[in-house]
Structure formats: C-alpha cells, structure tokens
Amino acid sequence: MATYTVLFTLLVAAAEHLSRPAALVGALAAHRMLPAPAAVAALVIAVEALLAVGGIVALLQDGGARLLTAVLLGSAALLGLYAGYGLRLISAGRPGSCGCSRMELPMTGWVVGRAAVLAGLALAALVLPDPAGTPGRAELAVVLLAAATFTALLWHLPAAMYQPVPATAGPPPHHRTVGSTEGGMSG
C-alpha cells in the first residue's frame, strides 16, 4: 500500500503541475531560493512523471523489482528534498505559495509534513517485507482502494488544514478599543 500511495501521489502531482505549470514556476520565482525557476519547475515535473510511470511499469512487469527499488529510492529522495525545501522556506520567513497544485496554497507545516510522510512511505516500502507476497485480485483491489484513499487524504491535507486569516478593515463602527475616546471622554 505504501508503494501505491507514493506512486499515485507522484502521478497526481505531475498531472496537477502539467495542467498549470505556471503555478510552480511562479511559486519558485517568488521564493527567490533557486536559480532558474522555470528550469527547476520543468525538471521537477519531469522527475515526478518519470518516477510515477516507472513505478507503474515496474509493478506491471514480472521481475521489475530493480526498477521499483530505483523508483522508490528516487521518490524518497525527491520527497525528502521537497520537505527540506519547504522547511527552509518556512524557517527563512518566506513561505509564499507552495506551488504544489493548481490552487494557491501557502507553504505550511502541513505541506512539509505531507512530503515527509510520503518520503517515509517510500522508504518503508523499500525496507518492510511484503508479508503476503504477490496479492491476488481481491487483495490488490483492497490495496489499490486504500492507496487511492490515502493519496486523496494526503493530497488534500494542506488545503483542508489551511485557515486563511480574514483581512480586516478596522474595528466596526461604534466599537471602542482600549485608549479610544468618544465625545472627548477617555475610555
């Protein structure tokens, strides 16, 4: 399930980035942390897509264990880099947009946490033995449904946890604050 969750998430990420690549380019440019934001964005999108497709091909092939191992190592590295980059942005006080989807979401601890969890899942898929071996059709259906559910939950976690601070135009009329005066009298 960890393998499928990582691969599904990379597939969703690549699809989101391909549907609106300017979001990632704009976010990277606004961060002012990396040179050549457009080139970095293109590389990120290509690596996400290659890892997702490579993992799916490895799962469909007999004897695709080596390719799957390489994909999971690459996924752990990429997702670990995402977590580290996000943490660096937050600690530098430049969170801005995460650029991780078509939506304008800020870089938050939830984005960093999601990347760290996914990197951990990729590593877990590498080191934890598969107790059941190759799953049958029924077991595979359950694993795929569970992985799709985890992918959806992890993908939407930062958006679900984001609570924008409403912009205020000042206190409402007839609202007294400490130190304000009404009619010349101290309040």
Image (cartoon, rainbow, N blue to C red):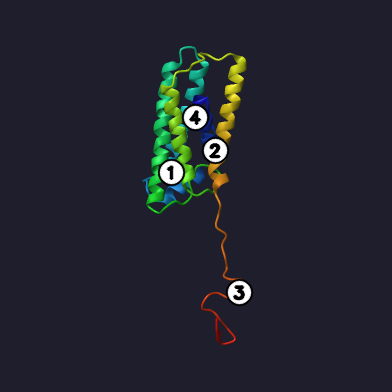
Amino acid identity at mark 3: His
State the residue position of label 2: 155
Dot label at residue 6:
4
Q: Position of residue 67 (x, y in %)?
A: 43, 19
Q: Compute the Cα span from label 3 to label 2.
A: 42 Å
Q: Are marks 3 and 2 in contact (CB under 8 Å)?
A: no
Q: Position of residue 150 (x, y in %)?
A: 56, 32
Q: Position of residue 94 (x, y in %)?
A: 41, 53
Q: Compute the Cα span from label 3 to label 4.
A: 52 Å
Q: Nearer the viewer, residue 138 or 10?
A: 138
Q: Earlier in the sequence, mark 3 or mark 2?
A: 2
Judge depth for marks 1 and 2 and give the one in front.
Answer: 2
- Residue farthest along the top direction in this orientation: 62
Q: Which residue lies at the image location 51% right of the left edge and 45% below the top edge?
A: 22
Amino acid identity at mark 4: Val
Q: Which residue lies at the image location 37% right of the left edge and 48% below the top edge?
A: 33
State which quarter of the image contains the C terminus: bottom right
Judge depth for marks 3 and 2 and give the one in front.
Answer: 3
Q: Earlier in the sequence, mark 3 or mark 1?
A: 1
State the residue position of label 3: 175
Q: Are marks 4 and 2 in contact (CB under 8 Å)?
A: no
Q: Is residue 2 above or below residue 186?
A: above
Amino acid identity at mark 2: Trp
Looking at the image, can residue 19 be seen?
no
* Label 4 Cα crowd, 10 Å radius (few <14 / some 14-19 / many 20+): many
Q: Compute the Cα span from label 3 to label 1.
A: 49 Å
Disc 3, SS: loop
State the residue position of label 1: 38
